[in-house]
Amino acid sequence: MRRDIFSEEHELFRAQFQRFAAREIEPRIAEWNRAGITDRDTWRRMGAEGFLGPCMPEAYGGAGGDFLYDAVVIEELASLRAHGLMTTVHTSICMPYLVSYGSEEQKRRYLPPAIRGELILGICMTEPGTGSDLASIQTRAIRDGDSYVLNGAKTFISLGQLGGLFIVVAKTDPAARPPHKGISLLLVEADTPGFVRGRKLEKLGLQAQDTSEIFFEDCRVPRANLLGEEGQGFRMLMEKLQQERLSIGVGAVASCRRALTDTVAYVKQRHAFGQPIAAFQNTQFTLAELATEIEIGQAFVDKLLVAHVRGDEIVSEVSMAKWWTTDLQKRVTAQCLQLHGGYGFMLEYPIAMDYADAAVQSIYAGSNEIMKVIIARRMGLG
Ligand SMILES: Cc1cc2nc3c(=O)[nH]c(=O)nc-3n(C[C@H](O)[C@H](O)[C@H](O)COP(=O)(O)OP(=O)(O)OC[C@H]3O[C@@H](n4cnc5c(N)ncnc54)[C@H](O)[C@@H]3O)c2cc1C
């Protein structure tokens, strides 16, 4: 169905990005998957062509567009299966923290190089002992003169090897009650003494994504690198999660489309019992049902994109979209894999990777169970 949320400018931007991606991204995906990491040159080229800051203020080198430009990049990367780049973390998740809560000095120092793709941004929330229960983090940032002394361990950090600046969630007041009131956000440069990159973790999917451990060992961070106010970290995180979760929904639906398109092509050319697999009613009904659900998902995500750009508060609805579209992605990839038969289990067929890549979508950015907790709470339940 024709989507009517994008303007002519958005579509021009999409065409421009598609040309860039065909030239600069697609040929590198296999190598990135083998290496377990993407490359800095591609980030710089993306920055130079304006694909890393389309929604950022012009004063810092962005293009001043709306979130639909980011959505275009998310869709195109998902469609190419270039999941390893995870530019969403950089552009749609981290940059908005700087724009909303950064001091003028922080914005001038970090946003221009980030938009140029020279400084890659990441966010460190999760720890080995806690993920969903963020208020229980153990990382401490204790004030000492003009610095915070940061100690703790983070894990599963996207862009953990490539990142040059991390938004670190830490307790500046470990005794605060309730505990979330003691949480603050610090901007930590990766070359600060005591910032230690740990292992790049071996994963089931997202092979090209350098998900890593990060440690802080008496890491001295200037007080000027506090983001926003002390003790306001949890509130800032909650405010920014809407866009993060919507981004996941946008990517999930685009990934579903790609898996479906490839599977439709596959079942037309694969034969069994003297006819194409596509001729079996089971194949037709399965794909018809999946196509229906993808259209439903797209309609919901598009409605939310428009509301988000308008500035509506849609925390419940975005939580609904996050769990539903990522569950859909898992169903779509599992059933499309099944229709590929044994070839679906072979890594040389992209559907096998689609299946593995889908698994994490219901876990990160707030697990799907946490999404239901949020929805239920907002319904007045519990
Ligand atoms: C590839 C990848 C990239 C990631 N990138 C980042 C990153 O860049 N930065 C970052 O900070 N983190 C990142 N994460 C971490 C991710 O956000 C966490 O894994 C996620 O929040 C879940 O936390 P956990 O793993 O500790 O699981 P847990 O919190 O231990 O949860 C385990 C299970 O219990 C369920 N559960 C927990 N609480 C409840 C509840 N109240 N009700 C019902 N069920 C519940 C969960 O839904 C889950 O099924 C990444 C993770 C992965 C795998």
Image (spheres, rainbow, N blue to C red):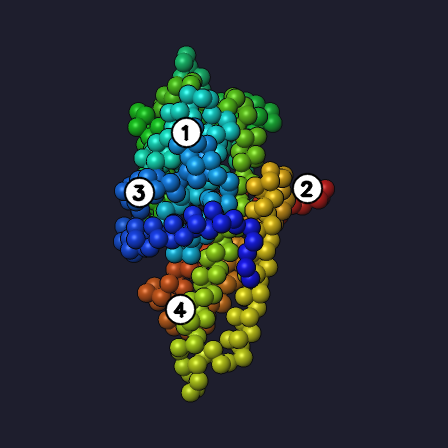
- In the rendered structure, which amino acid carries the disc numbered 4? Gly
Classify mark 1: helix, strand or loop.
helix
Foreground residue among 315 and 193? 315
Q: Is residue 43 left or right of residue 230?
A: left
Q: Residue at x 48, y 39 (%)?
A: 65
Q: In the orientation shown, which residue stands out farthest toward the top?
A: 145
Q: Which residue is mark 1?
A: 60
Q: Height in image: 136 above or below 367? A: above
Q: Position of residue 186 (x, y in %)?
A: 44, 26
Q: Which residue is mark 4?
A: 344
**In 3D space, how far apart are the residues under numbered discs 4 and 2 (Cα atoms)?**
41 Å
Q: Earlier in the sequence, mark 4 or mark 2?
A: 4
Residue 158, disc: none
Foreground residue among 34 and 109? 109
Foreground residue among 268 and 282? 268
| Foreground label between 3 and 4 | 3
Q: Residue at x 46, y 22 (%)?
A: 103
Residue 378, disc: 2
Q: Earlier in the sequence, mark 1 or mark 3?
A: 3
Classify mark 2: helix, strand or loop.
helix
Task: Please say whether residue 148 is visible from this viewpoint.
Answer: no
